[in-house]
Image: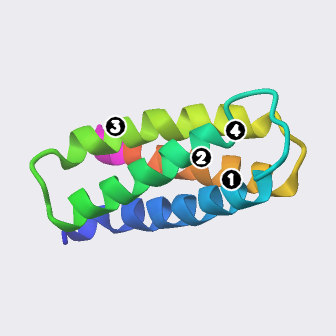
Amino acid sequence: MKLAYKSCIEACKKCFIDCQNCIVNMAGKESMNECPNCCIQCVDTCLSTIKMLMADSPFSLKQAALCAEICEWCAEQCQQHDHEHCQLCAESCLACAKECRKLAA
């Protein structure tokens, strides 16, 4: 793993955990938007990004850019809910998007 990837991997890990928590807490609750669907997609993308970065894939930077896009979308959705877990998820998504964008730039 490249040292340059470390902060992005850490942000993806935190985002994965907080999105998974949001999914669990939203189970059975009504949602006026794409939450928790966005969290499901975010979890999958964060895991894929971690795997690609760890493998130093030639597609790592493209994957990081995609992860940033999905995380930003998820943050928009979760920010619309007052639930603490949604707000925490949105924060983690934005932090992950920021790290992914820095890497992909």
Amino acid under disc 4: Cys
At 49% from the left and 43% from the top, the residue drawn is 41
Mark 3 or 2: in front is: 2
At 45% from the left and 59% from the top, the residue drawn is 12
At 32% from the left and 54% from the top, the residue drawn is 49
Q: What is the CA distance from the residue labelled 1 to the residue labelled 3?
A: 19 Å
- Disc 2: which residue: 39
Highlighted magenta segment, given as a residue range: 101-105
Are dots 4 and 3 in contact, CB under 8 Å?
A: no
Q: Which of the marked residues, 1 or 3, is nearer the chain's N terminus? A: 3
Mark 4 or 3: in front is: 4
Q: What is the CA distance from the residue labelled 2 to the residue labelled 1?
A: 8 Å
Circle 3 residues within 10 Å: few <14, some 14–19, many ≥20? many
Q: Is residue 52 left or right of residue 50?
A: left
Are dots 3 and 2 in contact, CB under 8 Å?
A: no
At 68% from the left and 63% from the top, the residue drawn is 21
Mark 1 or 3: in front is: 1
Circle 4 residues within 10 Å: few <14, some 14–19, many ≥20? many
SS category of the residue bearing label 1: helix
Tag of residue 57 = none
Residue 105 or residue 58, whichever sits in front: 58
- Disc 1: which residue: 89
Are dots 2 and 1 in contact, CB under 8 Å?
A: yes
Q: Which of the marked residues, 1 or 4, is nearer the chain's N terminus? A: 4
* Residue 9 place in picture, x, y as percent: 38, 64
